[in-house]
């Protein structure tokens, strides 16, 4: 019997419990740094599995780690459980219908992400015990991936320093090894301070902070023509200065999200945006303050680990669906556009196959995607330790992420099947690494080559604390 077959059976033995566990987290959507109930569910499951539990990682109340085993290599399996604002949605239907008006929802599948990762870790724990093999497996419960950069704070504080390799995954339309491409980013708040006055009786005495924000936005919009194609800049108004148009606004605040291919390019763009903000302040005779909210690094790939994970995908084969799975997925596809479906194929380097509602292949390892690229705080872990990520098929092909359609599928049978499938892939990859020390050595050798042997340097300011209060208040 192959090692992967035994650890896969350990996954199957728990799959019903973990599907229910995932559903419980889906039912309590909590946004960045407010995941108290969700982390409590994860802690309860860790206790049930007999883990040694460490809470409050990096001074983050909703970050947790559970460990099993003794000695040997340390394998980290990363999970998440934060939701998104404004994506409340009834499960199991193919029409937009909120559970709670304006409520939160798991529009990125993190209820599945955390459950599958903990499921994989628990299966590896059983395998270690049954075979009496030295080694430790850890489940890291990581909050606030959506804009909070929790893993960045954790990596900066040395949480992963004694880890040999890290494994993670993310829900997707297709199954395969994640192409290690993401954008580094930072969120910066720009607060302008002016002088209030009566906007009609004494406008000459006022200095408008809102004017400064608007001028900054215009300047950055002109800058977009003169930056790399793959870079992105977004902004959101946090404080427009009040609701009275007859008062010159003395304070206004805007948050900028700046994305780039890597940290050097990001730093260059940040410098340019700051100059524009300073120029807006000069033009309006106001003063500007800047404060970094969060920042993440780009993903760093690792070929030995990616090949090992791909071998597990090939041994396991694609997920298996039934007619009801395909029927509901087709109903979801009926709410999408042809462009949505085509974009999902392009992201995985695939040609569109009309009529296919769910993934029935393993995406070839050599495939390279096209289209937009997002960001993830897994990037910071990948610069701290050798890291590999899977993509697990858990939704109808073409489902946009951060959408009501994704939330609607979060408790579907096909989502559960995809979750179990990718848990087996992660568990098998962990077992391969523990049984083959040479695999870990190859992964570390490539990691050293890619990083130039330099220690991880966080893009977060050293004195910046996790924005627990700010993110929790939604500002």
Image (cartoon, rainbow, N blue to C red):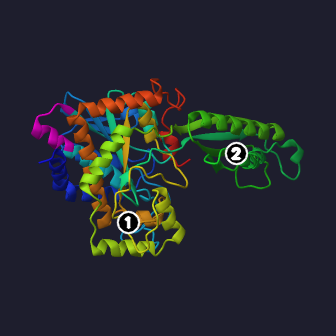
Element carrying mark 1: loop
- Locate residue 427 relative to residue 62 in the image: left or right: left
Q: Which mark is residue 252?
A: 2
Q: Residues within 10 Å of mark 1 (few under 14, many from 20)?
A: many
Give x and y (percent) for residue 193. 73, 39
Rendered location of residue 441, percent (x, y): 31, 29
Extreme residue in the front direction: 366
Main secondary structure of the magenta stretch: helix
Name the foreground residue: 177 vs 13.
177
Q: Viewer-proximal residue, 224 or 35?
A: 224
Question: What is the secondary structure assignment of the residue under circle 2?
Answer: strand
Residue 381 percent coordinates (x, y)? 41, 36
Q: Which residue is mark 1?
A: 409
- Residue 140 appears at what percent x and percent y? 32, 40
The number of discs equals 2
Mark 2 or mark 1, earlier in chain: 2
Q: Find the magenta span and give its range.
A: 124-135
């Amino acid at each position: 019997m192959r090692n992967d077959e035994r650890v896969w059976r350990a996954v199957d033995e728990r799959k019903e419990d973990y599907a229910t566990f995932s559903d419980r987290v889906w039912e309590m959507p909590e946004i960045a740094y407010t995941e108290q109930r969700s982390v409590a569910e994860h802690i309860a499951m860790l206790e049930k599995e007999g883990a040694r539990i460490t809470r409050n990682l990096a001074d983050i109340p909703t970050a947790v780690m559970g460990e099993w085993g003794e000695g040997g290599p340390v394998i980290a399996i990363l999970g998440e459980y934060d939701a998104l604002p404004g994506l409340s949605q009834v499960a199991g239907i193919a029409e937009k219908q909120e559970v709670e008006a304006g409520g939160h929802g798991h529009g990125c599948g993190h209820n599945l992400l955390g459950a599958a990762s903990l499921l994989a870790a628990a299966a590896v724990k059983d395998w270690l015990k049954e075979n009496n093999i030295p080694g430790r497996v850890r489940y890291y419960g990581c909050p606030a991936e959506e804009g909070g950069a929790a893993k960045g704070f954790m990596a900066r504080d040395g949480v992963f320093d004694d880890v040999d390799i890290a494994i993670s995954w993310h829900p997707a339309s297709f199954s395969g090894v994640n192409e290690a491409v993401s954008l580094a980013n930072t969120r910066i708040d720009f607060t302008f301070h002016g002088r209030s006055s009566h906007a009609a009786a004494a406008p000459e005495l006022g200095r408008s902070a809102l004017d400064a924000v608007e001028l900054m936005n215009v300047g950055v919009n002109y800058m977009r023509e003169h930056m790399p194609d793959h870079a992105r800049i977004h902004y959101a108004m946090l404080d427009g200065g009040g609701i009275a148009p007859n008062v010159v606004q003395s304070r206004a605040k805007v948050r900028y999200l700046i994305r780039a291919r890597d940290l050097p390019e990001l730093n260059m763009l940040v410098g340019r945006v700051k100059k524009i903000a300073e120029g807006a302040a000069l033009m309006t005779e106001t003063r500007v303050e800047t404060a970094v909210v969060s920042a993440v690094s780009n993903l760093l790939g690792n070929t030995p680990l990616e090949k090992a994970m791909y071998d597990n995908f090939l041994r396991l084969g694609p997920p298996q669906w039934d007619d009801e799975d395909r029927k509901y997925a087709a109903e979801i596809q009926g709410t999408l556009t042809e462009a949505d479906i085509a974009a999902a194929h392009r992201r995985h380097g695939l040609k569109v196959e009309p009529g296919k509602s769910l993934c029935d292949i393993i995406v070839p390892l050599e495939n390279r995607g096209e289209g937009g690229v997002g960001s993830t705080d897994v990037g910071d872990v990948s610069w701290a330790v050798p890291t590999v990520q899977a993509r697990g098929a858990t939704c109808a092909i073409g489902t946009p992420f951060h959408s009501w359609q994704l939330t609607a599928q979060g408790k579907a049978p096909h989502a559960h099947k995809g979750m179990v499938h990718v848990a087996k892939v992660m568990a098998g990859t962990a077992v391969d690494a523990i049984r083959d020390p040479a695999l870990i050595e190859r992964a570390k050798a490539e990691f050293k080559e890619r990083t130039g042997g330099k220690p991880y340097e966080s893009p977060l300011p050293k004195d910046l604390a996790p924005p627990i209060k700010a993110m929790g208040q939604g500002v």
